[in-house]
Image (cartoon, rainbow, N blue to C red):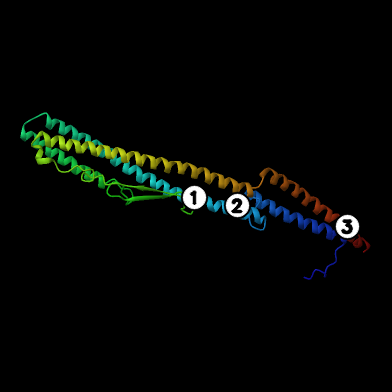
Amino acid sequence: MATNEISLTAGMRTNLLNLQSTSTLLNRTQQRLSSGKQVNSALDNPTNYFAAQNANQRASDLADRKDGMSEGVQTVSAANAGITAITGLINAAKGIAQSALSTSDTLTRSKLATQYDTIRSQIDNISSDSGYRGLNLLSATNTLTVNFNENASSSLNVVGFLATSSGLSMGANSGAWATASDITTDTAKMDTAISTLRSNTQTLAANLNIITTRQNFTDSMINTLQTGADNLTLADMNQEGANMLMLQTRQSLGTTSLSMSSQAAQTVLRLF
Protein backbone atom coordinates (compact mmCIF):
# COMPACT_ATOMS: atom_id res chain seq x y z
CA MET A 1 0.00 0.00 0.00
CA ALA A 2 1.36 3.39 -0.97
CA THR A 3 1.98 5.81 1.89
CA ASN A 4 -0.27 8.46 0.34
CA GLU A 5 -3.36 6.24 0.03
CA ILE A 6 -4.36 7.00 3.64
CA SER A 7 -4.21 10.51 5.01
CA LEU A 8 -3.32 11.00 8.67
CA THR A 9 -3.66 14.11 10.70
CA ALA A 10 -0.51 15.95 11.68
CA GLY A 11 -0.98 14.96 15.31
CA MET A 12 -1.45 11.28 14.47
CA ARG A 13 1.57 11.25 12.18
CA THR A 14 3.74 12.87 14.87
CA ASN A 15 2.59 10.38 17.49
CA LEU A 16 3.15 7.49 15.07
CA LEU A 17 6.71 8.60 14.36
CA ASN A 18 7.38 8.89 18.08
CA LEU A 19 6.03 5.38 18.64
CA GLN A 20 8.25 4.01 15.87
CA SER A 21 11.27 5.72 17.41
CA THR A 22 10.39 4.35 20.83
CA SER A 23 10.00 0.84 19.37
CA THR A 24 13.46 1.09 17.80
CA LEU A 25 14.97 2.16 21.12
CA LEU A 26 13.14 -0.67 22.90
CA ASN A 27 14.59 -3.23 20.49
CA ARG A 28 18.08 -1.81 21.00
CA THR A 29 17.72 -1.85 24.79
CA GLN A 30 16.38 -5.42 24.75
CA GLN A 31 19.39 -6.51 22.72
CA ARG A 32 21.76 -4.83 25.16
CA LEU A 33 20.05 -6.45 28.14
CA SER A 34 20.08 -9.90 26.53
CA SER A 35 23.71 -9.72 25.32
CA GLY A 36 25.11 -7.60 28.13
CA LYS A 37 26.84 -5.41 25.57
CA GLN A 38 26.13 -1.95 24.31
CA VAL A 39 28.37 -2.53 21.28
CA ASN A 40 27.22 -5.68 19.49
CA SER A 41 28.36 -4.83 15.97
CA ALA A 42 30.44 -2.32 14.06
CA LEU A 43 27.24 -0.35 13.41
CA ASP A 44 26.92 0.47 17.11
CA ASN A 45 30.41 1.95 17.52
CA PRO A 46 33.04 1.08 14.88
CA THR A 47 36.00 2.35 16.90
CA ASN A 48 35.17 0.45 20.08
CA TYR A 49 34.00 -2.64 18.23
CA PHE A 50 37.20 -3.19 16.26
CA ALA A 51 39.43 -2.21 19.19
CA ALA A 52 37.66 -4.82 21.31
CA GLN A 53 37.97 -7.38 18.53
CA ASN A 54 41.73 -6.83 18.33
CA ALA A 55 42.10 -7.15 22.09
CA ASN A 56 40.06 -10.36 22.20
CA GLN A 57 41.96 -11.87 19.27
CA ARG A 58 45.29 -11.17 20.96
CA ALA A 59 43.97 -12.66 24.20
CA SER A 60 42.97 -15.77 22.25
CA ASP A 61 46.41 -16.03 20.63
CA LEU A 62 48.10 -15.71 24.02
CA ALA A 63 45.80 -18.39 25.42
CA ASP A 64 47.06 -20.72 22.69
CA ARG A 65 50.65 -19.93 23.69
CA LYS A 66 49.75 -20.78 27.27
CA ASP A 67 49.00 -24.32 26.19
CA GLY A 68 52.50 -24.56 24.71
CA MET A 69 54.01 -23.24 27.94
CA SER A 70 52.10 -25.85 29.94
CA GLU A 71 53.45 -28.57 27.67
CA GLY A 72 56.95 -27.12 28.10
CA VAL A 73 56.60 -27.27 31.88
CA GLN A 74 55.62 -30.93 31.68
CA THR A 75 58.57 -31.76 29.41
CA VAL A 76 61.04 -30.10 31.78
CA SER A 77 59.34 -31.72 34.78
CA ALA A 78 59.69 -35.15 33.14
CA ALA A 79 63.41 -34.51 32.63
CA ASN A 80 63.77 -33.36 36.23
CA ALA A 81 62.05 -36.51 37.47
CA GLY A 82 64.51 -38.56 35.43
CA ILE A 83 67.48 -36.67 36.85
CA THR A 84 66.24 -37.21 40.39
CA ALA A 85 65.88 -40.96 39.80
CA ILE A 86 69.26 -41.25 38.08
CA THR A 87 70.95 -39.34 40.91
CA GLY A 88 69.40 -41.78 43.38
CA LEU A 89 70.74 -44.74 41.40
CA ILE A 90 74.22 -43.27 41.22
CA ASN A 91 74.23 -42.74 44.98
CA ALA A 92 73.18 -46.37 45.36
CA ALA A 93 76.03 -47.38 43.03
CA LYS A 94 78.45 -45.38 45.17
CA GLY A 95 77.25 -47.34 48.18
CA ILE A 96 77.99 -50.57 46.31
CA ALA A 97 81.46 -49.29 45.46
CA GLN A 98 82.11 -48.48 49.12
CA SER A 99 81.08 -52.03 50.03
CA ALA A 100 83.50 -53.36 47.42
CA LEU A 101 86.32 -51.26 48.86
CA SER A 102 85.69 -52.65 52.32
CA THR A 103 86.43 -56.23 51.24
CA SER A 104 89.33 -57.91 49.51
CA ASP A 105 87.38 -60.99 48.50
CA THR A 106 87.43 -61.12 44.69
CA LEU A 107 84.21 -63.13 44.44
CA THR A 108 82.34 -60.57 46.56
CA ARG A 109 83.78 -57.74 44.51
CA SER A 110 82.77 -59.48 41.30
CA LYS A 111 79.15 -59.79 42.53
CA LEU A 112 79.13 -56.15 43.59
CA ALA A 113 80.53 -55.16 40.19
CA THR A 114 77.62 -57.03 38.56
CA GLN A 115 75.20 -55.04 40.70
CA TYR A 116 76.94 -51.87 39.55
CA ASP A 117 76.45 -52.87 35.91
CA THR A 118 72.76 -53.55 36.62
CA ILE A 119 72.39 -50.02 37.99
CA ARG A 120 74.14 -48.63 34.91
CA SER A 121 71.57 -50.42 32.74
CA GLN A 122 68.73 -48.95 34.80
CA ILE A 123 70.21 -45.47 34.41
CA ASP A 124 70.06 -45.97 30.64
CA ASN A 125 66.44 -47.13 30.90
CA ILE A 126 65.39 -44.14 33.01
CA SER A 127 67.14 -41.77 30.62
CA SER A 128 65.20 -43.19 27.67
CA ASP A 129 61.90 -43.16 29.61
CA SER A 130 62.07 -39.52 30.72
CA GLY A 131 60.38 -38.05 27.65
CA TYR A 132 57.05 -36.28 27.37
CA ARG A 133 54.97 -36.44 24.21
CA GLY A 134 57.88 -37.53 22.07
CA LEU A 135 60.49 -35.07 23.37
CA ASN A 136 63.17 -36.34 25.75
CA LEU A 137 65.66 -33.89 27.20
CA LEU A 138 67.79 -36.71 28.70
CA SER A 139 68.27 -39.06 25.75
CA ALA A 140 70.13 -36.63 23.46
CA THR A 141 70.83 -32.94 22.98
CA ASN A 142 67.22 -32.32 21.99
CA THR A 143 65.92 -28.76 22.16
CA LEU A 144 62.57 -27.70 23.55
CA THR A 145 61.37 -24.38 22.10
CA VAL A 146 58.72 -22.55 24.10
CA ASN A 147 57.08 -19.54 22.42
CA PHE A 148 55.77 -16.81 24.70
CA ASN A 149 53.98 -14.23 22.55
CA GLU A 150 51.52 -14.34 19.68
CA ASN A 151 54.05 -13.91 16.85
CA ALA A 152 56.71 -16.17 18.44
CA SER A 153 59.23 -13.32 18.53
CA SER A 154 59.77 -14.06 22.23
CA SER A 155 60.79 -17.63 23.02
CA LEU A 156 63.06 -19.85 25.10
CA ASN A 157 65.19 -22.78 23.98
CA VAL A 158 65.73 -25.51 26.60
CA VAL A 159 68.64 -27.69 25.49
CA GLY A 160 68.79 -31.26 26.79
CA PHE A 161 71.78 -33.48 27.44
CA LEU A 162 72.64 -37.19 27.30
CA ALA A 163 71.99 -38.62 30.77
CA THR A 164 72.79 -42.25 29.97
CA SER A 165 75.63 -43.99 31.78
CA SER A 166 77.90 -43.41 28.79
CA GLY A 167 76.75 -39.81 28.45
CA LEU A 168 77.65 -39.30 32.10
CA SER A 169 81.03 -41.00 31.48
CA MET A 170 80.14 -43.97 33.67
CA GLY A 171 81.86 -46.65 31.63
CA ALA A 172 81.72 -50.39 32.29
CA ASN A 173 83.35 -51.37 35.57
CA SER A 174 87.10 -51.72 35.35
CA GLY A 175 88.07 -55.39 35.32
CA ALA A 176 85.15 -56.50 37.54
CA TRP A 177 86.67 -54.36 40.29
CA ALA A 178 89.62 -56.70 40.67
CA THR A 179 91.63 -54.02 42.48
CA ALA A 180 90.88 -51.11 44.80
CA SER A 181 92.17 -48.80 42.10
CA ASP A 182 89.45 -50.04 39.74
CA ILE A 183 86.80 -49.20 42.31
CA THR A 184 88.13 -45.73 43.12
CA THR A 185 88.32 -44.99 39.37
CA ASP A 186 84.64 -45.79 38.90
CA THR A 187 83.76 -43.91 42.11
CA ALA A 188 85.41 -40.81 40.69
CA LYS A 189 83.36 -41.25 37.51
CA MET A 190 80.18 -41.41 39.60
CA ASP A 191 81.15 -38.22 41.43
CA THR A 192 81.66 -36.51 38.08
CA ALA A 193 78.28 -37.83 36.87
CA ILE A 194 76.51 -36.42 39.93
CA SER A 195 78.23 -33.07 39.40
CA THR A 196 77.04 -33.06 35.77
CA LEU A 197 73.50 -33.87 36.83
CA ARG A 198 73.49 -31.10 39.43
CA SER A 199 74.74 -28.56 36.92
CA ASN A 200 72.08 -29.51 34.38
CA THR A 201 69.40 -29.57 37.09
CA GLN A 202 70.22 -25.95 37.92
CA THR A 203 69.91 -25.02 34.25
CA LEU A 204 66.57 -26.82 33.92
CA ALA A 205 65.32 -25.20 37.13
CA ALA A 206 66.23 -21.75 35.81
CA ASN A 207 64.44 -22.46 32.52
CA LEU A 208 61.41 -23.83 34.36
CA ASN A 209 61.26 -20.66 36.45
CA ILE A 210 61.29 -18.55 33.28
CA ILE A 211 58.46 -20.57 31.74
CA THR A 212 56.27 -20.43 34.85
CA THR A 213 56.93 -16.70 35.21
CA ARG A 214 55.85 -16.17 31.61
CA GLN A 215 52.75 -18.28 32.28
CA ASN A 216 51.75 -15.97 35.12
CA PHE A 217 52.52 -12.91 32.99
CA THR A 218 50.44 -14.32 30.14
CA ASP A 219 47.51 -14.90 32.51
CA SER A 220 47.73 -11.25 33.57
CA MET A 221 47.94 -10.04 29.97
CA ILE A 222 44.93 -12.11 28.90
CA ASN A 223 42.93 -10.71 31.81
CA THR A 224 44.02 -7.16 30.95
CA LEU A 225 43.08 -7.55 27.28
CA GLN A 226 39.71 -9.10 28.03
CA THR A 227 38.92 -6.46 30.64
CA GLY A 228 39.87 -3.72 28.17
CA ALA A 229 37.64 -5.24 25.51
CA ASP A 230 34.77 -5.48 27.97
CA ASN A 231 35.20 -1.86 29.02
CA LEU A 232 34.75 -0.86 25.38
CA THR A 233 31.67 -2.95 24.70
CA LEU A 234 29.80 -3.94 27.87
CA ALA A 235 26.57 -2.20 28.77
CA ASP A 236 25.66 -0.68 32.11
CA MET A 237 22.88 -3.08 33.09
CA ASN A 238 21.45 -0.71 35.69
CA GLN A 239 21.19 2.06 33.15
CA GLU A 240 19.76 -0.20 30.46
CA GLY A 241 17.17 -1.54 32.92
CA ALA A 242 16.13 2.03 33.75
CA ASN A 243 15.99 2.81 30.03
CA MET A 244 13.70 -0.16 29.47
CA LEU A 245 11.27 1.03 32.14
CA MET A 246 11.25 4.56 30.73
CA LEU A 247 10.77 3.37 27.15
CA GLN A 248 7.90 1.11 28.14
CA THR A 249 6.27 4.08 29.89
CA ARG A 250 6.89 6.28 26.86
CA GLN A 251 5.40 3.63 24.57
CA SER A 252 2.28 3.41 26.73
CA LEU A 253 1.92 7.18 26.77
CA GLY A 254 2.51 7.35 23.02
CA THR A 255 -0.23 4.83 22.38
CA THR A 256 -2.59 6.86 24.56
CA SER A 257 -1.59 10.08 22.77
CA LEU A 258 -2.17 8.48 19.38
CA SER A 259 -5.63 7.40 20.49
CA MET A 260 -6.40 10.93 21.66
CA SER A 261 -5.18 12.49 18.41
CA SER A 262 -7.53 10.23 16.46
CA GLN A 263 -10.56 11.50 18.36
CA ALA A 264 -10.91 14.47 15.98
CA ALA A 265 -11.49 12.06 13.12
CA GLN A 266 -13.87 9.97 15.19
CA THR A 267 -16.14 12.99 15.79
CA VAL A 268 -17.07 12.83 12.12
CA LEU A 269 -18.78 9.52 12.80
CA ARG A 270 -21.16 11.24 15.22
CA LEU A 271 -22.58 13.26 12.34
CA PHE A 272 -24.21 10.15 10.96
* Vertical relation: 101 (above or below) 121: above
Q: Amino acid at mark 2?
A: Ala
Image coordinates of residue 156 in percent, x first then y, are: 41, 48
Image coordinates of residue 9 in percent, x first then y, are: 87, 62
- The dot on residue 263 is 3
- The dot on residue 52 is 2
Instruction: Please name whichever residue, 9 or 226, is drawn nearer the observer in this view of the structure.
Output: 226
- The dot on residue 221 is none
Pointers 2 and 1 in contact (CB under 8 A)?
no
Distance (Cα) linking label 2 and label 1: 15 Å
Q: Quadrant of the C terminus?
A: bottom right
Q: Amino acid at mark 3?
A: Gln
At mark 1, the secondary structure is helix
Instruction: Please name whichever residue, 20 or 96, is drawn nearer the observer in this view of the structure.
Output: 96
Within 10 angstroms of label 3, few (less than 14), some, or many (20 or more) residues? Answer: few
At mark 2, the secondary structure is helix
Pointers 3 and 1 in contact (CB under 8 A)?
no
Image coordinates of residue 210 in percent, x first then y, are: 42, 42
Q: Amino acid at mark 1?
A: Leu
At mark 3, the secondary structure is helix
Image coordinates of residue 158 in percent, x first then y, are: 36, 47
The tag earlier along the polypeptide, 3 or 1, is: 1
| Front disc: 3 or 1 | 1
The residue under the point 31% across, 41% down is 200
Of all residues shown, which one is farthest toward the right? Answer: 271
Instruction: Please name whichever residue, 12 or 45, is drawn nearer the observer in this view of the structure.
Output: 45
Instruction: Please name whichever residue, 233 or 107, is drawn nearer the observer in this view of the structure.
Output: 107
Within 10 angstroms of label 2, few (less than 14), some, or many (20 or more) residues? Answer: many
* Number of numbered callouts drawn: 3
Residue designated by label 1: 62
Left or right relative to 34: residue 120: left
